[in-house]
Amino acid sequence: SVTGVWQYALVGILTLAAIRRVDDMRVLWRYMIDAVMLSVVIRMATRGEVYMTHEGLNPMRLGSIAFGPAVYYSGTVAIVLTLGLGLLNATRSGWGKAVCIAVLLLLAVEQVSTFTRGGYVALATLALLPLFKGTRRFAAGMALFAGVVLLVFGRWVLPILFLRPISLEEPSVQQRFWLIEMGIGHCFDNFGFGHGIARYIMFEDPIGTGGETLATHSLLLQTAQMTGGLATLALIGLFAWILVGLWKVARTDRGPAGRTAPFVLIAILGWH
């Protein structure tokens, strides 16, 4: 626990110390997006995956060399795509907007190609943008653009999105609930100090796939198993404090901070 979750608090403190203005925050966003785009370019040059490919009902899920397999990479893309929308909202030059739109379209294709339902749900949190006065106009334009895209390309994109359906009757969804139920019972192993870094618990697949073992597919539960439930509760408290502060700024500030905070808030909510 000492060397695990607590590092997030240290990184958070250092980040807050480095950010003095809204423009500093946007510079950080650009670095994050650049890191993902660099990994995409390197992957294309070395591995050359084809986007949105599948064999029948079996999708070839896109991962990343730097950010891990599809289930983890999808969360990263959801964050940077949301922050990219924040940059688009703040950019005033025509060329800047064109670059942002091109990057966002590529990230959207990356997200779809992960075939990760959690990633799709994470992007659904963008529906919160109309709650904030500073982003309502932008949210309306984004909804109009998304509607046009679906109208033109929907017949090709929608079937791909639903290759892995989101349904409570779907065996893989039931599997996730079972894994979460099993994982909760191990949140406070070893008196709340966990089993150690990268030592999360694997459970036997309940739907029967030849003895395959699986993790809980939950960031918080796996963190609790590794670095302990006590440290994980502290992490949850840290994020709750951050989210409350962002909510207050997004709802009350009418300046640049009020137009920036909603995207950070939604990025964090979607990632979780």
Image (tube, rainbow, N blue to C red):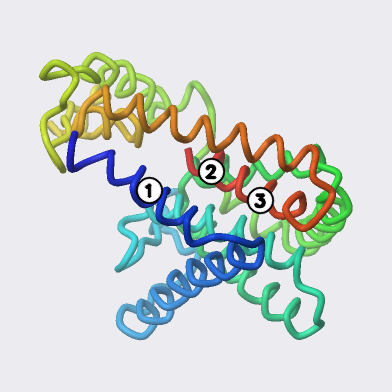
- Horizontal side of residue 213 vs 111, given as left or right: left
Count neighbours of disc 3 (C-alpha within 10 A) and say few if under 14, some if 14 to 19, many if 20 or more: many
Contact check, label 2 and label 3, Cβ < 8 Å = no
Q: Amino acid at mark 2?
A: Ile
- Real-space Cα distance between discs 1 and 3? 22 Å
User: Of label 1 and label 3, which has the lower sequence position?
Assistant: 1
In terms of depth relative to the viewer, which is nearer, 247 or 131? 247
Q: Amino acid at mark 3?
A: Phe
Contact check, label 1 and label 2, Cβ < 8 Å = no
- Horizontal side of residue 205 vs 107, given as left or right: left
Q: Amino acid at mark 1?
A: Val
Q: Nearer the viewer's eye, disc 1 or disc 3?
A: 3
- Secondary element at tag 1: helix
In terms of depth relative to the viewer, which is nearer, 260 or 131? 260
User: Of label 2 and label 3, which has the lower sequence position?
Assistant: 3
| Image-quadrant location for residue 180 | top left
Q: Which residue is mark 1?
A: 71
- Real-space Cα distance between discs 2 and 3? 9 Å
Point out residue 254 in the picture as x, y percentages from the top left corner: 84, 49
In terms of depth relative to the viewer, which is nearer, 246 or 19? 19
- Secondary element at tag 3: helix
Point out residue 139 in the picture as x, y percentages from the top left corner: 81, 51
- Secondary element at tag 2: helix
User: Of label 1 and label 2, which has the lower sequence position?
Assistant: 1
Q: What residue is at 46 percent from the left and 64 percent from the top?
A: 53
Q: Which residue is mark 2?
A: 268
- Real-space Cα distance between discs 1 and 2? 17 Å
> Can you say whether 133 is above or below 20 in the image?
above
Point out residue 146 in the picture as x, y percentages from the top left corner: 77, 57
Q: Which residue is mark 3?
A: 263
> Can you say whether 97 is above or below 141 in the image?
below
Point out residue 178 in the picture as x, y percentages from the top left corner: 32, 19
